[in-house]
């Protein structure tokens, strides 16, 4: 099964793209990674493994918080950003709203 990455997200997160508006993108641990790892939509099998691999890459990223903040600010509904998948970001926003 192939995961389709929305064009605007793929371009914005492709840290190899010189047109990216993200000044921190080139410092990201995912720079040069296969982007499909970060946009797996499944919760089992190979898709879950891809998501776990993406989160592993994020683990030691020097710009992890900037990436997460960017995804939260733009309310991005797809992919792993800052080490969190969409459901994890939703829960984070809900917790912060409740606090």
Image (tube, helix red, strand yellow):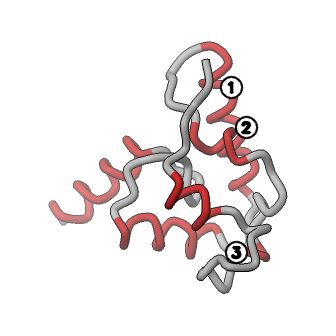
Which residue: 62% across, 35% down? Answer: 51
Q: Please state which of residues 42 and 94 is positioned toward the viewer in this rendering.
A: 42
Left or right side of 27 for 76? left
According to the image, label 2 marks what residue? 53
Q: Quadrant of the C terminus?
A: bottom left
Up the image or down, 97 lies above or below 70; here it is above
Dot 1 and dot 2 residues touching (CB under 8 Å): yes
Left or right side of 71 for 81? right
According to the image, label 1 marks what residue? 49
According to the image, label 3 marks what residue? 25
Q: Quadrant of the N terminus?
A: top right
Q: Quadrant of residue 15?
A: bottom right
- Number of numbered discs visible in the structure rendering: 3
Left or right side of 72 for 10? right
**Cα–Cα span, label 1 and label 2:** 6 Å
Mark identifier at residue 21: none
In primary-sequence order, the first of circles 2 and 3 is 3
**Cα–Cα span, label 2 and label 3:** 19 Å
* Direction right: furthest residue: 32
Residue 41: x %, y % from top left: 50, 30
Which residue: 68% across, 79% down? Answer: 19
Residue 59: x %, y % from top left: 70, 54
* Direction bottom: furthest residue: 23
């Amino acid at each position: 099964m192939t995961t389709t990455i929305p064009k605007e997200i793929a371009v914005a997160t492709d840290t190899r793209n010189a047109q990216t508006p993200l000044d921190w993108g080139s410092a990201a641990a995912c720079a040069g990674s296969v982007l499909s790892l970060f946009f797996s939509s499944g919760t089992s099998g190979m898709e879950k493994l891809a998501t776990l691999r993406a989160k592993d890459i994020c683990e030691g990223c020097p710009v992890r918080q900037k990436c997460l903040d960017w995804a939260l600010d733009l309310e991005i509904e797809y992919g792993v950003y800052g080490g969190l998948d969409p459901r994890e970001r939703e829960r984070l926003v809900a917790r912060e709203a409740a606090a």
